[in-house]
């Protein structure tokens, strides 16, 4: 019992950590990458850092609001979508109960429960409509109930991660005047940051560390290279 | 049976549509918003459109790669995370089978199944280890198996949506020379696009249409206003 409890707790912690980490990853990946790429691109066509800083700051502000609010709205729609499907499930229980009962039975049979026992269990589950609907949501629609406060937490986490990530490539342009020198320092600092971020991301998500670190770093470099070449080509 | 099948199919379609729509929403929200905000911010401090176009294009390229690859990596980690938890579940079935059997029983009891019947059903489910682990994943950890090819589809959808979204606010700067005129047209076109996008988003996700449209539009305007004011303040 003691052990079962601690395992359950461990699993629970795993799950909410995984949501937080996913949001930090979403915000930080883009935050490290897009402002890095944008400032790198502009440094190829501008000699002073003034406009690069303005662009970088504008982009970080826009990115924070867009991703934060975007994340909030996405989380909110998830809750609304779940609620709509749940409502439909309840109405099907009212209107076609024998069909829904058969569906519970079929799901149990698929789980390896004998036919007659499935019928018995289905009848017991159907005694409580909330449990019945919950069963259908999880096992027929395979939808998990999203946490109600998830959207706001998710939004804040994504926005802050974007902000923190975005300042790393930008700060060399703030403290230097020559855009070329700032560009080299920004590349150096950001590639190191991408590697550290990639390393922690891989550790936390249980991916192979070298492969994971490499993937994150190459994404940032690819985005910066694309922006740099495009800016050069257009100017 | 015919009806049950068509309902199941409807629900399946619902589910994969919901993933696609979610990705389009993620890409298009940011695509419409960030390049809009960035170009708007720069138009406040620059008189010609040349550098605005370069910034906008760099940002779109960086955003597509970052969000697309970011989405791909996030989807891939989801698959890897699921596989790691599944492996752990299998190992627990091997090492502490009586504890895992008790967990199946407890879950069934919570569903409203009587104690003795729960024991019987748990024993039947545990005859097949794959079904047993599957049961634990869905009902104890509440994790759904992510589709294997989801990551690549998701990445492409997000990147393309970002690209399409990003060109809407940018194209006025491409066809005009005066940044002020281009700014007004970009605002007009993008706010309309945000409203249309918000309307469809609300329809598809089953949200109240006016509220949903308003939310999307206000996010875009807030991001652009923040970028504009920040650019003005810094320059």
Image (spheres, coloured by chain):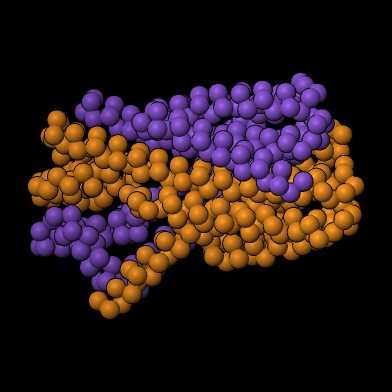
Chain colours: A orange, B purple
- Residue at the limit of the structure toward the front, as seen here: B233
- Do we see residue B153 in this rendering? no
Q: Position of residue B235 (x, y in %)?
A: 77, 46
x, y percentage for residue B136? 32, 59
Q: Which of B6/A228 is in front?
A: A228
Of B54 and B231, which appears nearest the observer?
B231
Q: Quadrant of residue B8?
A: top left
Q: As drawn, is B36 to the left or to the right of B112?
A: right
Q: Nearer the viewer, residue B186 or A205?
A: B186
Residue A31 against residue B160 in the figure, above or below: below
**Left or right of residue B207, residue A45 in this image:** right
Q: Position of residue A218 (x, y in %)?
A: 72, 53
Give me the residue at 29% from left, 26% from top. Answer: B6
Q: Is residue B183 left or right of residue A107?
A: right
Q: Is residue B8 left or right of residue A63?
A: left
| Residue placed furthest toward the top | B175
Q: Residue at x 13, y 56 (%)?
A: B113
Most foreground residue, B144 or A183: A183
Residue A227 is situated, as x and y percent measured from the top left of the image, at 77, 42
Residue at figure coordinates x 66%, y 22% from the top left? B185
The quadrant holding residue B160 is: top right
- Residue B129 vertical placement versus B233 (above, below): below
Q: How many marks?
A: 0
């Amino acid at each position: 019992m003691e052990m079962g409890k601690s395992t359950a707790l461990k699993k629970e912690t795993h799950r909410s950590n995984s949501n937080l980490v996913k949001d930090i990853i979403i915000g930080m990946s883009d935050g490290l990458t897009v402002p890095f790429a944008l400032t790198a691109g502009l440094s190829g066509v501008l000699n002073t850092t003034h406009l690069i800083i303005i662009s970088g700051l504008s982009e970080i502000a826009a990115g924070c609001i867009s991703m934060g609010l975007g994340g909030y709205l996405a989380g909110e729609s998830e809750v609304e979508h779940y609620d709509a499907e749940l409502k439909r499930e309840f109405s099907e229980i009212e209107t076609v109960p024998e069909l829904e009962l058969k569906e519970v039975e079929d799901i149990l049979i698929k789980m390896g429960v004998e036919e007659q026992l499935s019928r018995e269990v289905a009848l017991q589950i159907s005694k409580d409509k909330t449990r019945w609907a919950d069963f259908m949501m999880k096992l027929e629609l395979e939808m998990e109930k999203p946490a109600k406060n998830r959207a706001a937490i998710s939004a804040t986490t994504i926005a802050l991660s974007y902000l923190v990530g975005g300042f790393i490539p930008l700060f060399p342009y703030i403290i230097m005047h020559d855009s070329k020198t700032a560009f080299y320092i920004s590349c150096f600092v950001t590639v190191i940051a991408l590697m550290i971020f990639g390393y922690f991301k891989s550790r936390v998500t249980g991916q192979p560390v070298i492969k994971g670190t490499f993937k994150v770093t190459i994404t940032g470099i690819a985005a910066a290279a694309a922006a740099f070449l495009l800016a050069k080509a257009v100017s």
